[in-house]
Each structure stands twice: as C-alpha cells, then as structure tokens.
Amino acid sequence: MDPGSAPTPGAPLSPLIRLFRRAAIDLEPLQHSTFRRIWTGQAVSVIGVQLTAVAVPVQVYAITRSSFWVGVLGAVGLVPIVVFGLWGGAIADAVDRRRLAIIASTLEWFCTLGLLVHALLGWESLPVLLSLVAVQAGAFAVASSTWGAVIPRIVPLESVPSANTLNFTTSTTGAVIGPLLAASIVSTWSFAAAYALDAVLFTVTLYAALRLPPLPPMERAGTPGLRSVLAGLAFIATRPVLLLSFAVDIVAMVLAMPKALFPEAAARFGGGAAVGWLYSSIAIGSVVAGLTSGWIGRVRRQGVALVIAVVGWGLAVAASGATHQLWATVALLGVAGAADLVSAVYRQTILQTYAPDEMRGRMQGVFIVVVTGGPRLADLRAGATASVVGLQTAWVGGGLACAALVVFALLSPSLRRYDSRAALPASVPAASSEPSGAVPAVEP
C-alpha cells in the first residue's frame, strides 16, 4: 500500500464508519474499573445461573414425573422474590451496599453448592430442592436490588443508559447460551456437572462484589422495616413517571408475553427444534438490539421512547402470533425482543436517575418484583385465555391489547414531557460536591 494513501490523523471518517460508531453498543461504561468488574462478573455468571435455572426443574421432573411439582417450583421461587425484593431494597438504602452485595451473593453461591452436594450424594429429596430454590430466590432478589442501586454510584449518570444496555445485553446473551449448554451438560453428564459449573462461574461475581468500594448511604434512610418498604411504595405512588413506568412494564408482560403458548405452537410447527427456536427468539432479538444500541443513550425523551418501545413490543408479538411459518414467527419475536431490550433499558434508567439515591434500593426491589412476577402472571393469563378462545386469539389478542393500552400512558404530562437531562442534576450531587463516603462518578 502506498504510504501516501494511508488515512491521515484527523481525516474525516467515511459515512459508513460514522454510522457504525453511532449504532454500535456504547462501551464507555467499561472504562470505569468497578463497573467493568461487575459487568464481567455478571456476563460470566449469568450463563451459570441459566444452567441451574434449567437443571433444577428438569431434576424435579425426573424425581416426581409430575409437571405439577415443576409448577410448584416456580411458585416457591416467586414468594421469596416478592418479599425479599421489597425488603432487600429497603436494606440496600440503609446499609453499605458493598457489604449487602457480598452477603447476598455469597448466600446465592452457597445454595448452588447445596444443589451440587445434593446431586453428588445421589439424593432425590424434593423438600431439599424446593428449600434451596426458595432461599436462593430470596438471596437473588436482595442481590439484584443491591446491584441495580450500585450502578448510578459507580458511573456518571449520563452513562447509566449505556451501562444498563451492556448489562441487559449480556443477560439476554446468557439466556440464549445457558439453556442450550444446560441441555447438553445434563444429557451428556449429570445435574451435578451443571451445578458445579454454575458454582465455578459465580465466583467471578463474588470477586466483583469483594472489589467494590465502600458504598454507605448518602442520606439517612431509617430502619429497613415495613415502614421503610411502605415509604418506598408511597414514593412511587406520588411520582407519575415512576408509577407509569412500572405500569407499562406490567401491561407489556402480563398481556403480551406468549411463552406459555410456545409448546403448543411448536407442536403445530412440527415439534422437534421448533420449541428451541421459539424459546430463544426473544433473547436473540434482544442481543442484536443490544449490539446496535449506540443511539439509546442519546435519547432524552425517555418517557415517550419507553411507550413507543412497548407499543412496538405488543405489535410485534401480535404479528408473530398471526403467522403460520416458523421462520416468520421467530423473526417477529426477535423484533419484539429488540423492542423489549430498549424498553427495559429506559425503565431501568428512569428508575435509577429519577429516584434519589436514598430510594434507589427500594425502587430496584419493586423493579425486581415486577420483572420476575410479570412473566409468571403472563403464563397464567396466556394459558387460561388459550384454553377458552384458542392459541392464535390468545397470542394475537394479548399483543394488540398491550399496544392499545400502553398508548394511554402518554396522556400523563409527566411521562410525556420527561427529559433525562432534567433528572440528572437532582439525582446525585456532582462529583465535586459529593458527600463523605460517596463514590466518585469517574474513576482514575
């Protein structure tokens, strides 16, 4: 190559390269070492978490030969998530979040070790499995509430949307890889092998928790009891932006999530690999959206963007249920997954930047309850509706109902006019005026 033809420093970039840079996922948060460790830990451990999430119900079915007990397993996990999601968020507002993240993550890890020991000893105790899952679900709820409240303390607030996008993208990537890997490990080796790999991978998250800087409360939040939890719920009730962001999420999940219909749909598509494609399609779309999400952090009218994304989710779900070709259904569910990632990033970002730091733990607790409870209610709604009106009507009707109802959220001036730039100064003091014990937004 002629040296004289090489691009000179400062030369204008081609339009294609500029477009790629604007569309590619924003990696700026990874410049902050604390966030980088957290992201790496979660990116690695989420695969292990998915291994256990698949292995436990398969093991329960192998022991009982009953789908009823597999369903009970989900209910056993839901109750601790609701209770400890709310209470754990209150604790996260009152204590050092580093310490709480270490305790909750360690408890999660010990539960995985308990599942491993149970499998290695050849036990087939349903009460032991259910108990370990219940404790692990409670620990997960506390840890998730804490990690979500940590993010705005370790990156600049303008980088929070990008940080959330990175986290959600790695989570959905794990949701694609983990189940496929779990099926291979369980069928080739054993349940113990799946639990062992989960335990090994989760040590990366434990390391990230241990390396967190001290994160004491920036404001006194009071005793983390029932009164504190109710104060957090009251805060949401008096803030239309937060209340509607939760309401939109509940509508999106309960009315439009079609996962409970996938087994029947797969049978209509001929069975075999169809069920795998259906279950992975939403996550695949979310991964693609995450990798092309450079624009997300530049959107300021996040309330309007949230509603548009959820409307897109509902319409894509409805369209996927109206098709009669597997490839078209999977592609449209992928579009729905892309819209779901965008809406999830904006919901989480509004929550983290609109609420003051002393409320963020409790807000994250409610967030965890909504995002984990909504899909379980969606399964009940979809299954019951399909049994009455049929698969296609339940699938398409749920998506259309979601899109139609969510539009009404824009009638709220607070959500319609919400601008992320107005939320930044009020959320956390600037780095130069941080109170004692706060973590600088930009690390050396």
Image (cartoon, rainbow, N blue to C red):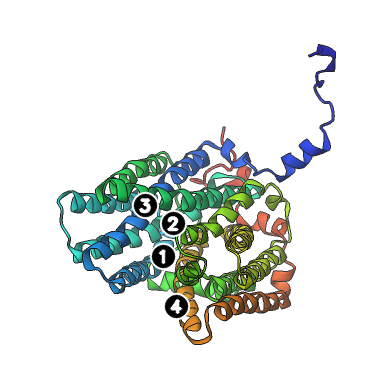
Q: Could you tell me the amino acid type at mark 4?
A: Leu
Mark 2 is surrounded, within 10 Å at the Cα level, by few (under 14), some (14 to 19) or many (20 or more) other residues, namely many
Give the SS element for disc 1. helix
What percent of the width, then of the height, locates residue 188?
30, 46
Q: Which element type, helix, strand or loop, lies under badge 2?
A: helix
The amino acid type, in three-letter code, at marker 2 is: Ser
Residue 82 position in % (x across, y down): 40, 70
Label 3 vs label 2, nearer the camera: 3
Q: Give the CA distance from mark 2 to mark 1.
A: 8 Å
Of tags 2 and 4, which is closer to the observer?
A: 4
Give the amino acid type for the residue marked by disc 1 in the picture.
Gly
- Taking the spot 47% from the left edge, 69% from the top edge, the residue there is 267
Of badges 3 and 1, nearer the viewer stands 3
Q: Residue at x 47, y 62 (%)?
A: 275
Q: Is residue 424 above or below residue 374?
A: above
**Residue type of the residue flagged with mark 3:** Ala
Q: Which residue is mark 2?
A: 144
- Of the two numbered discs 1 and 4 in the rendering, the one whose residue sits closer to the viewer: 4
12 to the left or right of 270: right
- Residue picked out by circle 3: 183
Q: CA distance from mark 3 to mark 4?
A: 25 Å
- Contact check, label 2 and label 4, Cβ < 8 Å: no
Residue name at image x 34 percent, y 66 percent: 77
Residue 354 in view of the camera:
no
